[in-house]
Amino acid sequence: MQWDAEYEQVVAEYAAGRDVAELERQYGLSRAEIEWLVAYQAQQRLSGQPMSDEELNARRGTPPGWVVGAALVFAFGAVVGLAGVIVAAIQGLGGAAVVSGIYGALFGSVVLGLWQGRRGSLIVAIIFGIVSLPFGLIPILLLLVPASAREWFADSERTRARSAV
């Protein structure tokens, strides 16, 4: 992340008590990004060292309830896949155990990516949802319809570039 004067202004206005909704409109940033910038500057002032990406992501907070709901749907798929490994191993079906393990790991990685706000996981979740219609319609709706869920996956670099224009 490259710090610039615009970010300083956002943080200063936030600290002065300006409404976050106004800051969102003026600078083209989401609420999560504004809070992220404030946390980043506070950490820089305290330690003099920049935060790592992992620390910055941890400060974003928890995802919106819609994203958590979709992640739970995929977590159920991961548990089913891992249970399939156990059942297949007990029955001596090595190939089925491997396939179930891959299935469980793939769904588990989608859950982690959704939780972290990764766009790639959003795309994979949508593809899985389309492939498994009509049941896949639930996570698709949970991830694409609510504005807070869409904001969770917003590409912050593109948002900042759009606000600079």
Image (spheres, rainbow, N blue to C red):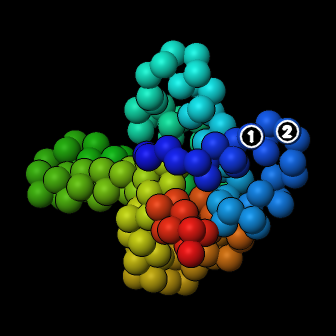
The residue under the point 87% across, 48% down is 18
Q: In the structure shown, which secondary structural element does the residue marked by tag 2 occupy?
A: loop
> What's the residue type where badge 2 is placed?
Ala
The residue under the point 51% across, 16% down is 47
Residues under labels 2 and 1: Cα distance? 6 Å
The residue under the point 25% across, 51% down is 101
For the C terminus, which image quadrant? bottom right
Q: Position of residue 75 (x, y in %)?
A: 49, 51
Front one among 98 and 86 = 98
Q: Position of residue 68 (x, y in %)?
A: 62, 53
Residue position for label 2: 16
Residue position for label 1: 12
Q: In the structure shown, which secondary structural element does the residue marked by tag 1 occupy?
A: helix
The residue under the point 69% across, 47% down is 9
Compared with residue 130, is residue 164 higher up or lower down, i.e. above or below?
A: above
- Asked if one can make out residue 56 in the rendered structure from this viewpoint, the answer is yes
